[in-house]
Image (cartoon, rainbow, N blue to C red):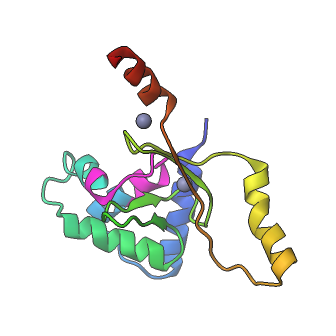
Amino acid sequence: MVDHSIRFNEMMKKLKTKGCRLTPQRLAVVKILAASEEHLSADKIYERVKPDFPSTSLATIYKTVTLLKKIGELMEIGFVDDSNRYDGMRPYPHPHLICMKCKTMLDPDIPTLSELPKELAQKTGYQIVNHRLDFFGICPQCQRKEQFRS
Ligand SMILES: [Zn+2]
Ligand SMILES: [Zn+2]
């Protein structure tokens, strides 16, 4: 089990050194993102913050997300249909595995994939600063659901 408090403390430390002021609502967003294994969308973050802070607006979520991105503590995975997702646990480029049906998003733990940017840099002489590696498919749960239907 991953200890989410470690990541949360890292994010808090960075926010403090950058002199960012944190309202309880923003703090709640940071806490959710520090444990966001699911790669939440802004809407989903909003849904989770709202019960505790009914006065929170979607704008607050976006402001906090933008702030965390700016200080390098959050990774945004953008999509053309505007359903951007966020990874606060791994705020650096890494491969993703995405289910086309339920939109589940995973960080595949495959060493070969993590080695790719380094290999590419060596082969081409490029200084790789960013990369995007998405794998699309149907997750096991959705595959099972399909079997039930037919
Ligand atoms: Zn699925
Ligand atoms: Zn991720």
Q: Is residue 143 above or below residue 77?
A: above
Quadrant of the image occupied by residue 118: bottom right
Instruction: Magenta stretch: give its range.
Output: 30-44
Residue sitting at x 37%, y 40% = 101
Q: Nearer the viewer, residue 24 or 99?
A: 99
Quadrant of the image occupied by residue 120: bottom right
Q: Nearer the viewer, residue 39 or 49?
A: 39
x and y, in percent, of residue 129 in the image: 66, 80
Residue sitting at x 46%, y 66% = 76
x and y, in percent, of residue 19 in the image: 45, 82
**Numbered marks: total:** 0
Residue 103 relative to residue 113: left or right: left
**Farthest front residue?**
150
x and y, in percent, of residue 71 in the image: 50, 78
Indicate the quadrant containing the N terminus: top left, top right, bottom left or bottom right. Answer: top right
Q: Nearer the viewer, residue 30 or 123?
A: 123
Residue sitting at x 50%, y 59% = 88
**Farthest left residue?**
55
Residue 34 relative to residue 40: left or right: right
Residue 148 relative to residue 90: left or right: left
